[in-house]
Image (cartoon, helix red, strand yellow):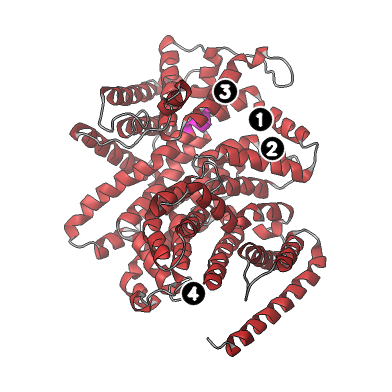
Amino acid sequence: MSVFSTFIELCSVGRARQLDPLGSALNTLISIALAVGFFAIAAGVYVDQTIALHIFLGGTLTLVFLNTTGNARRPQTSSFISYGLALCSTLACLYFVVMGEAHSNRLPVLDALTGWDMVFSLMLIVLVLEATRRTIGIVLVALVGIFLIYALIGGDIGGGFSHRGMGLEEMLDHLVFTTNGLFGPALEVAAFLVFIFVLFGAIFDRFGGADFFYDISNALVGKQVGGSAKVAVVSSGLYGSVSGSPTADVVTTGSFTIPLMVKTGFTKTRAAAIEAAASTGGSILPPVMGSAAFLMSDFTGIPYGTIAAAAAIPALLYYFCIYTSVSLYASKTNIAVMNQGVIPSAGTVLKRDWVYLIPLVTIAWAVLALNRPSYAGALACAAIVPVMLLKTRPRSDIFPRLIKSLSDGISRVLTVGVACAAAGLVIGTLSMTDLTGKISSALFAMAQGNFLLTISTAVGVIIILGMGMPVPAVYALAAVLAAPALIALDIQTLPAHLLIVYFAAVSAITPPVAVAAFAAASIAQANPMRIGFLACRIAIVAFVIPFVFIVQPALLMIGSPIEIISVTLYALLGCLCLTAMFEGYLFGHVGRLEKLVFLGVALLLFAPIGHYRLLPFALMLIYLYWKRRTSRQAQRVSPI
């Protein structure tokens, strides 16, 4: 093994530890304390925000070092180093809690930092970078490092990217002691918004929520052609809209759906790709949308209810595309229908499990009707109590399950918390050096003011940033790097930022670092690269629809009812044509010439050409009617 490959392996992400009794006890106590504390904050209990963020970051870093090894080669047992780093994390954040009053009375930048302030500030940044390396990888650490180095030496480089210059003390002051850096908007959203919804998903899952989604999906679509894959699409969409994590969705629902799809005739690669694509869509499907929508609301000032309503039609088009792809492929390859005897009716499932609708209706109502997303999350968690009481037998299992779900929720939010802390360091650097404006100007200049080229360049930046990172962290970085360039094109704020959310989400299936595809590959035992490329093909609409709503905001319910309805119908038929082209089937085999026609019609229907789309729309409907009728006549005369 070469020196370089050994170095890369040593810098790789760590593995989950097998905790010893002490580590297990500490992990449980800290997890419960954080869960209870931040649930109380979400429910309305007042705690100083700065102190709460220090506690959240300290707890997150401590748990990361307790639960994650230094790299893949390290033993999975606990070590003195892990306990030492966990202790340093606790002490560093405890210092800021204890010194909170003194720090709140000083004037940032103007009043000098003490020696201990600088020591603990540096310690905290180093710990965040090490936790980032262990949980996400060296790429994000390198990215943050580049920005930090730029802050220190950027005043000496000259040229358009030079800034006024600053020393180490000023940089630390800005990054740690103001609300524009480490303890800025990104970490706030992770602590006060993402956390409560992840906790809701963990509790709901632990008390049978994932099983309910699977059963109701099975009842609704299991009897159809390709029913096993349609169950995967519907159940993954429902679960993903609550969990908001593509990887968690794949692992949770995919463990059921992927083997079922393979058993009924889908190839391993196809089954895993369908699951990865369906799970990824949860990050753009209201009500939770992978929590990036809450960050978007904080960044833009747009109410969350407005964002969720705007995202509804594009999200439904996304799932229509995946569902149609499954249906066409199953019809083309004659996939066997699932065993009808094991599929319950929807009425039976709802009669047995109606109680699961209480938290789901609560969360949907609360996030849309209340202008307090964190309180909505707390209400949703409280609404699971009837589920606990009615569905847990024996009742004595309620408390152990609840404790386990709190621990699960904390473990799921660790990566997001660390990523948002790292993103805060980047955002702080951008704000104090005005690098945001420089990068935006550079993107605009590189594209020479070309509308499509500027958007495409921004999309490329978002997808690269999204390699292996949680959706909220990708959005936090891209919102300050790419959004200004998009808005400079006179694109409205809502479409510009929603485009970033979309491409931050689909980076989960975009090779080479497609985390959802890798998760699905581990279940299907198939090639992750093939799964990633096929998932992108199945979810092709996700790469098209953002460009559509950028130039036609009516797709986001911005405009008159006639505009919204017409643009939606055009996009719906365009999605059908695009999916049929890629699958090569629609009421029969689709030849090369038909594929070209479908592609051309899809592009016309997506284009902002007003009433000129009526002709291709009408002609395509007539053609589809004729093709469907011809297909049915052929089936009637078939000797089979």
Image coords of residue 222 (percent x, y): 43, 72
Front: mark 4 or 1: 4
Along the polypeptide, which appears first: circle 4 or circle 1?
A: 4
Residue bearing the label numbered 4: 225
Left or right, residue 373 beside residue 297:
left
Along the polypeptide, which appears first: circle 1 or circle 2?
A: 1
Q: Verify CB contact (< 8 Å) between mark 3 and mark 1.
A: no
Q: In this orientation, which residue lies closer to the viewer: 595 or 119?
A: 595
Image coords of residue 218 (percent x, y): 40, 70
Front: mark 2 or 3: 3
Q: Verify CB contact (< 8 Å) between mark 1 and mark 2.
A: yes
Q: CA distance from mark 4 to mark 1?
A: 50 Å
Magenta stretch?
421-425
Residue bearing the label numbered 3: 146
Q: What is the secondary structure assignment of the residue under circle 2?
A: helix
Q: Is residue 263 magenta?
A: no
Q: CA distance from mark 3 to mark 1?
A: 14 Å
At horizontal 52% and vertical 32% (from top left) the residue drawn is 423
Q: What mark, if any, has residue 484 been given in the picture?
A: 2
Q: Amino acid at mark 2?
A: Pro
Pointer 3 local density, CA inside 10 Å: few below 14, some 14–19, many at least 20? few
Residue bearing the label numbered 1: 436
At horizontal 51% and vertical 30% (from top left) the residue drawn is 139
| Magenta segment main secondary structure | helix
